[in-house]
Structures are given as structure tokens and as C-alpha cells.
Amino acid sequence: MPMDYKVSGNDIILRQPDFDLGQTLDCGQAFRWEEISGGWQGFYKDSFLIITDEDKEENLFRFHDVSEEEFLTVWASYFDLDEDYGKLKKRFSSDGTLKEACAFAGGIRLLRQDSWEALCSFLISQNNNIPRIKGIIKRMCGLFGGFPTAERLASSSLDELAPLRSGFRAKYLLDAARKVSSGEVDLEELRKIPVEEARECLKKITGVGPKVAECALLYGLHRLEAFPVDVWIKRVLAEYYPDGFPEEFREVGGIAQQYLFHYIRKGR
DNA sequence: TTCCAGGCGTATC
DNA sequence: GATACGCATGGA
């Protein structure tokens, strides 16, 4: 499916069905986006973006002050524009619950986030709520002048992280920073190896259990077979899938999970 | 005031 | 291997 976009002055105009900014950027997968008039602003690594709805009827979006090269090399990947979500949703529609979830919020896309940032984000997410997760990450970026690299974080102390008010999670961040910066956990390598091995490798980090490992795999490494189960997904599984989640969707279970998560929280 | 939040480490059985 | 409890913080 060729990408449908054009250059407009300093901006890029994209035509993209199956894409809703709020549903995608505020559904608990990424925590560095904030709503502005007509759209959203946020970061991928150090790249800043303002993206607005250009024409909702026509599925048009405006990427502000973005060169064609930056659009193609950074944002097209970040927003997963190569994936045909229409086709995915069609596939999911053979299941009644998933059909409902996709009908409720069919504009969700699975972002291809930075692996290190996603790992940190979901370490912070544990036993926490979304507004506070955002607050902690915002304070972290403020403290370090952008999202800190693993190396930078590894060279800091618990005292330095105190202003984050991240509670017991601060020590987890430091352990992750040490193991990633030393190469003991090689995040990029985890894209290639069998998912079960990648899971076990991530769990070497203190504070990474089953849930955080799945989130790091899905949101940071785009391992679509990862299926994070939190309290909300537990409710979905208990209520709608008492015999287990359908095996036929397992290879893209992470995307299905994203629709279901949003649906159970906001959709009924 | 008490409960809960995209859990995990530890102790105990 | 299963289950119970504490953990930092702050909003509801």
C-alpha cells in the first residue's frame, strides 16, 4: 500500500485511513504526547512533532515543520504507516468482541517507539496510573534535558532521581540503565531472537516481570506476538474469553490487545 | 479516610 | 507453584 502524502510548504500532508490522533497517542501506549489546539505535540527520541487534523472527513493529517526526509525516515516508521490496519481489523472482525472494540476505536495504531524509552516507561507504569506515569516521565525529561540515554541514567544516583517522585521504581530505572548500557541486555538483539528468549533476557532487569517484559516487547520492539495482561485485560479475558484468547490472532495479539484495552476502559 | 493505579520482589507454605 | 503482603505517590 503506497503512502499517500504531499509536501506543503514546510509541512507534510498525509492521507491515512484507520488513524485517529487521540486514540493512538492517548491510549496508554506512549506517555510523552500532549493535546494542543487541533492536534497533538510530542517526541520520538529527540525529534519534536506537532501533528494536527487537517480534514477529518478526508483522513488528512498535517505534520508541521517536517521535511520529506524526516517524514519518511522518522515519522512514517513511528506511526507504523506501512501496516494495513484496515486489513487487520477485517481479520479481527470474525470475533464478536474484537469487532466491537475495533468499531469503538478503529483509529488506534501501534506506535514503533524507542526501545529504551518504552522499557523505562513501562517500568514506571507498574502499580501506577496513566496521569502520574506521564508526570514522572515529564519530570525526567525536564531533569535531563530530553529523555536520558541508558548511559546517562546509569551514571546518576538515586538521590538525583528523587525529584522525579517515582517512588520505589527509581531503583528499577537505575538497574535497567546499568544492564542496557553495559550490553548485558542488548535491546536491539531482542528484536531478532525467539520471543521467549527475549522475555527471559528482559526479566534479568530488577523490576521487569511478566507484564513489563510484554510491554517492552510490544511497544519498544514491535514484537506483535507479545500480549501484555494487566488488570483491565484480565477483565476482558474473564468476561469475553473464558476459554482463552483465540490462537488464530496470537501472532498479532499485541495489536488486538490494544483495541481491547481501550474498549474495556472507555468503551462500555 | 480509604481505595486504586497498564506489577514486582520477597517471604511463606 | 501458588498466595499474601509491602512498596512510593497522588488522584478519586
Image: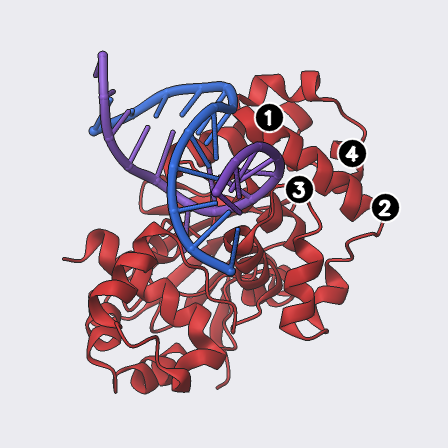
Chain colours: A red, B purple, C blue
Label 2 belongs to which residue?
A182
Amino acid at circle 2: Ser
Instruction: Say which quarter of the image contains residue A258.
Output: bottom left
Residue A187, located in which quarter of the rendered image?
bottom right
Marks 3 and 1 share the same chain: yes
**Disc 2 to disc 4: CB gap under 8 Å:** yes
Q: Nearer the viewer, mark 1 or mark 4?
A: 4
| In-image side of A138 versus A233 (left or right) | right
Where disc 3 sits, the SS reads loop
Could you tell me which residue is drawn at 28 percent across and 69 percent down? A106
Disc nearer the start of the sequence (3/4)? 4
- Residue situated in front as seen by the camera: B2 or A226: B2
User: In the rendered structure, the residue with mark 2 lies on which chain?
Assistant: A
Cα–Cα gap, marks 2 and 3: 15 Å
The type of residue carrying mark 4 is Ala
Label 2 to label 4: alpha-carbon separation: 9 Å
| Between A202 and A53, the one nearer to me in the picture | A202
Residue A123 % position (x, y): 56, 42
> Which of these two is toward me, A112 or A191?
A191
Tag 1 secondary structure? helix
- Numbered disc total: 4
In the drawing, does residue A68 fall left or right of residue A267?
Answer: right
Q: Which three-letter amino acid code belongs to the residue tagged 3? A: Thr
